[in-house]
Amino acid sequence: MEGKTGYPIVPNFIAGFNGVVPSMARLVLTCARVLTKQFDPLRHGFGVANTSVAFLCGRLFALCESDLPYEVKVTEDGDIITLGRHDFGSIEPFLRMTAHPKIDKATGEAFCYGYDVKCAAIHDFAVTENYVVFPDTQIVMNPWWILRGRSAVGIDPDKIPRLGIIPRYAEDERGMRWIDAPGFNMLHCVNAWEEDGGGAIVMVASNIVSAEHIFDDMESSQLTLRS
Ligand SMILES: [Fe+2]
């Protein structure tokens, strides 16, 4: 769509809001594009699908967590064709899915999660033999910040990061156990497994050391590997 018009149309919810006036101008412009049918988010989606790619259920997907996965096809001459958004036939409708689904190579199962913009911004997770681990970090999402001219994604310095551990096949949140993890703002999980017969979970993950700068000054925000 943007290739056809020659300029960006799809709003960027992380970097696209940098002041009340420009944010409002972009909002008005986006509304005008929807009204003139130049941008049809209900039909074509609103995601940029630029975060990762994953091969799930025999299909290739381009993913960004602001929207559902987009199924793509690579043609014989190397072109990439978008086939459309996919919700995997979910009974419960959802609008956004993680860009980092996990495949259990032993069983062939795929694990994904969807989330609402009102919750914490959970970018990645971990799956072990019997558990799933979700990080709840200081990176939070607050759409109201857009009205203050800030990005909808930012840092809550007063929040204590924590890890949520839930049985792998839990049907609801009742089995979730939360463990405080001060100073651990996990961004990506490299790997996770169980030790001591399932009594311990080891997770190797990247940690944002100075989270307060992650969005405005990435140069001074360090990432370390932690387990
Ligand atoms: Fe990522």
Image (tube, rainbow, N blue to C red):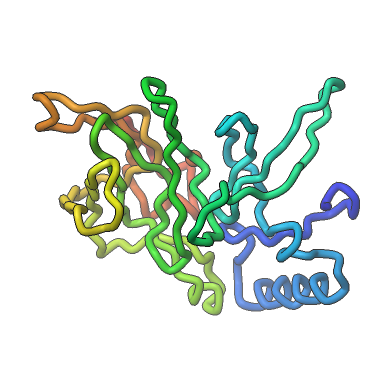
Horizontally, residue 169 falls left or right of residue 48, namely: left
Q: Position of residue 138 (x, y in %)?
A: 32, 57
Q: Quadrant for residue 190, please give it.
A: top left
Q: Quadrant for residue 13, please give it.
A: bottom right
**Is 207 or 4 nearer to us in this picture?**
4
**Relative to 90, residue 187 above or below:** above
**Is 166 or 222 nearer to us in this picture?**
166
Q: Please name the residue shown 68% across and 62% down the image.
A: 11
**Relative to 25, residue 89 above or below:** above
Tally of numbered discs: 0
Q: Please name the residue shown 16% across and 50% down the image.
A: 179
Horizontally, residue 22 falls left or right of residue 211, namely: right
Q: Position of residue 115 (x, y in %)?
A: 45, 58
Q: Position of residue 137 (x, y in %)?
A: 31, 53
Q: Position of residue 35 (x, y in %)?
A: 83, 76
Q: Please name the residue shown 64% across and 39% down the image.
A: 62
In the rendered image, the quadrant that contains the C terminus is: top left
Q: Please name the residue shown 15% across and 24% down the image.
A: 195
Horizontally, residue 12 falls left or right of residue 171, namely: right
Horizontally, residue 187 falls left or right of residue 100, namely: left
**Relative to 168, residue 28 above or below:** below
